[in-house]
Image (tube, rainbow, N blue to C red):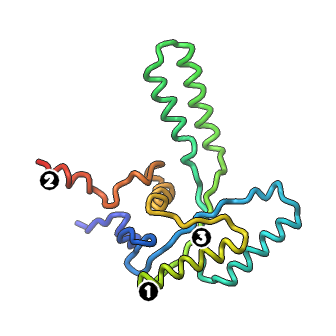
């Protein structure tokens, strides 16, 4: 019988640290970047944005760029419609709610919403050095015209849940798989 490993073990994920995600070999701090709608910009402004990104990457060559689908945007509406369907007795209203649900399913499939992130790795550094590095990176990103914020633990959990298609409510997932079952055992 083979020793089965969890996804967490296969990827070397250890835990959430003070500044981000910790793995067996390194740590990661993530920065969420507000995307710019370039379809409304002039060619000159697009060139300026590209130049700013090139300058940023030359100043911080270890900076990594991540682009993910951000498909959670319709889930709140879908939950609301499902709840309404359970309560609604009028067949005409139920039919409209079902059409709304089908519409949300269709537009979610066609949705091209994206989430843009910058990532910085830190290894063999003390907390103070990591803090300084994160602050410097955040400042340089902002100085190059990007609306950025460092992602907190709940944001990172949500990002991982979207990436692994585990849940659209990743921030609600437990830190340790099966942790909720241990509490039940302790209460028995």
Which quadrant of the figure contains the N terminus?
bottom left
Which residue appears at 54% of the width and 47% of the height?
72
Residue sitting farthest toward the left: 188
Residue 158 appears left or right of 143: left
Residue 166 appears left or right of 148: left
Q: Mark 2 sits on what residue? A: 186
* Residue 184 horizontal/vertical position (percent): 18, 49
Q: Mark 1 sits on what residue? A: 125
- Residue 127: quadrant of the picture: bottom left
Whether tag 1 and tag 3 are in contact, CB under 8 A, the answer is no
* Residue 134 horizontal/vertical position (percent): 53, 77
Which residue appears at 48% of the width and 23% of the height?
85
Q: Nearer the viewer, mark 1 or mark 3?
A: 1
Residue 57 appears left or right of 186: right
- Residue 149: quadrant of the picture: bottom right
**Structural distance between the alpha carbons of marks 2 and 1:** 37 Å
Relative to 85, say whether 34 is above or below: below
Q: Mark 3 sits on what residue? A: 118
Which residue appears at 40% of the width and 51% of the height?
172
**Structural distance between the alpha carbons of marks 1 and 3:** 20 Å
Whether tag 2 and tag 1 are in contact, CB under 8 A, the answer is no
**Structural distance between the alpha carbons of marks 2 and 3:** 40 Å
């Amino acid at each position: 019988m083979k020793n089965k490993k969890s996804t967490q073990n296969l990827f070397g994920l250890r835990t959430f640290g003070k500044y981000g995600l910790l793995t067996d070999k390194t740590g990661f701090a993530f920065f969420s970047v507000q995307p710019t709608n370039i379809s409304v910009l002039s060619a000159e402004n697009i060139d300026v944005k590209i130049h700013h990104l090139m300058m940023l990457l030359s100043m911080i060559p270890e900076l990594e760029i991540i682009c993910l689908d951000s498909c959670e945007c319709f889930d709140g509406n879908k939950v609301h419609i499902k709840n309404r369907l359970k309560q609604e007795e009028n067949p005409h209203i139920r039919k409209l709610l079902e059409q709304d649900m089908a519409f949300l399913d269709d537009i979610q499939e066609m949705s091209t919403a994206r989430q843009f992130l910058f990532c910085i790795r830190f290894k063999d550094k003390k907390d103070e050095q990591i803090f300084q590095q994160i602050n410097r990176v955040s400042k340089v990103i902002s100085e190059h015209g990007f609306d950025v914020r460092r992602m907190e633990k709940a944001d990172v959990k949500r990002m991982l849940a979207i990436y692994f298609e585990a849940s659209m409510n990743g921030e609600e997932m437990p830190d340790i798989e099966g942790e909720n079952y241990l509490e039940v055992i302790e209460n028995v």
